[in-house]
Image: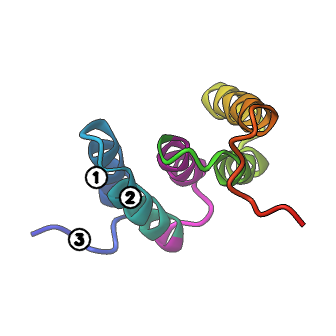
Amino acid sequence: MLDPADATLYSNRSFCHLKIGAARDALVDANACIGLQPDWPKAYYRKGAALMSLKEYKEARDAFMEGLKLDPSNLDIQNAYREAEEAMIKNHSTGQSVEPLE
């Protein structure tokens, strides 16, 4: 029987969802993982990866930043943060921002 309180299971399932193109499901599982183990950098990496797939670049960057706060030396999260930052800037500069103009 699977343990519904095991954050690793949600992290792994989030990864699997992402690999099959189910980014929203990946995000749900990443958030569940964070809820169970909020001090685990990988949980925030999973959330950021799901958000990148959904083209939610600012939110992805923020998720990666949370992971970096927990593990500043994590190269995977550092690289993902940079990718999210670049995608956010590129998306904004091409006028594809979904944020309303005020």
x, y (%) of residue 22?
Answer: 30, 50
Say left or right for 27 vs 4: right
- Find residue 94 and report its image quarter: top right
Measured Cα–Cα span from mark 2 to mark 1 = 12 Å
Quadrant containing the N terminus in the rendered view: bottom left
Marks 3 and 2: in contact by CB < 8 Å?
A: no
Between discs 3 and 1, the one toward the N terminus: 3
Which numbered disc flags the more N-terminal residue, 2 or 3? 3
Q: Secondary structure at mark 2?
A: helix
Give the SS element for disc 3.
Answer: loop
Badge 2 crowding class, 10 Å Cα cut-off, few under 14, some 14 to 19, many 20 or more, is some
Image coordinates for residue 31, horizontal then vertical, percent:
48, 66
Q: Residue at x 68, y 42 (%)?
A: 96
Say which amino acid is labelled 3: Asp
Q: Which residue is mark 3?
A: 3
Q: Tell whether position 82 is magenta.
A: no
Q: Amino acid at mark 2?
A: Arg
Observer-nearest of 41 and 86: 86
Numbered label attached to residue 24: 2
Task: Give the numbered dot on residue 83.
Answer: none
Closest to the observer, 85 or 13: 85
Q: In the rendered structure, which disc, 2 or 1, sits on the residue that comes first in sequence?
A: 1
Amino acid at circle 1: Arg
Colour scheme:
rainbow
Q: Is residue 61 left or right of residue 2?
A: right
Q: Quick check: 25 left or right of 54? A: left
Few, some or many residues within 10 Å of mark 1 (<14, 14–19, 20+) = some
The residue at 47%/48% (across/down) is: 50
Q: Which residue is mark 1?
A: 13
Residue interval drawn in magenta: 35-52
